[in-house]
Image (cartoon, grey):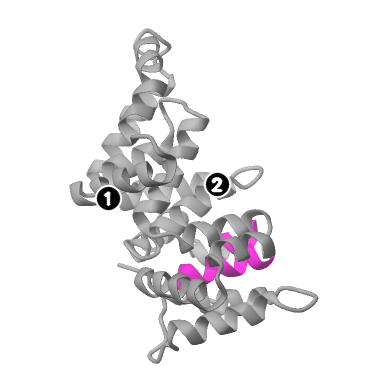
Amino acid sequence: MSTLSIPVSVPSPYDDSEQLRKAFEGWGTNEGLIIAILAHRSAAQRRQIRDAYAQAYGEDILKALEKELTRHFEKAVLLWMLDPPERDAVLANEALKKWSSGNRALIEISVTRTSDEMFAVRRAYHARFKRSLEEDVAVHTSGDFRKDLKADPKDDFLFALRSIIRCIICPEKYFEKVIRLAINKMGTDEYALTRVITTRAEVNMKQIKEIYYKRNSVPLERAIKKDTTGDYEDFLLALIGEDA
């Protein structure tokens, strides 16, 4: 179940666009207003905002957000604003750039998406990168996997197999572990934390939060507050159902 909190009465996408434009104007960006709007709109509503903003101001709102925001907050908001297939395409492309056979992002996409969703991801990947996802995966994996079959039993190949099995058996437990490993160590893995929350907030984040609490005896909200700061923290908390 989703943790996304959407107001009973939602302004029109044109009103939202106008408010976001105001958040970008002046001496400083109004990050709180950006979070208040974008973290409380569904994928369809966010798509309408993108369309309305482009019509009203002749600019893709993603470009405006990229100019106004920074670091992990910027990354999270930009991923959140993409349609799910395009978001997965971007994550897959990033994963292939730093390929290892145990790459969690590719495993998550290939195992937890339906066949229709994967078809949409493949189309989005080709539209954005002008190459097929299958060809890029083949280029990066053909020699890795042959080599990994002969490697140490603790290698990336077996790690990938274990991750795939966990994803198939219980995706929610798998994603809980990814989050736990991302924040329960020296130094936060913001890439993993952002990836899981932006891709699962509208899918099964409620169950992931419940499993996290049972496993760690600490609410996920508290763990995120401990490990993140500023607008990035506020945005993640809003997506998992608890505004700061």
Instruction: State whether the magenta stretch is mostly helix, strand or loop.
Output: helix
- The mark found on residue 208 in the picture is none
Residue 228 part of the magenta-drawn span: yes
- Disc 2 versus disc 1: distance between alpha carbons? 23 Å
> Quadrant where the C terminus lies?
bottom right
Residue 117: image location, x then y, percent: 25, 51
Residue 11 part of the magenta-drawn span: no
Which residues are the magenta region? Answer: 224-242
Residue at the image position 50 percent from the left and 87 percent from the top:
15
**The quarter of the displayed image where residue 47 is located:** bottom left
- For disc 1, the marked residue is 120
- For disc 2, the marked residue is 191
Give neighbour class at mark 2: few <14, some 14-19, many 20+ (Cα, 10 Å).
Answer: few
Above or below, comparing residue 13 to residue 215 in the picture: below
Foreground residue among 61 and 57? 57
> Quadrant where the N terminus lies?
bottom left
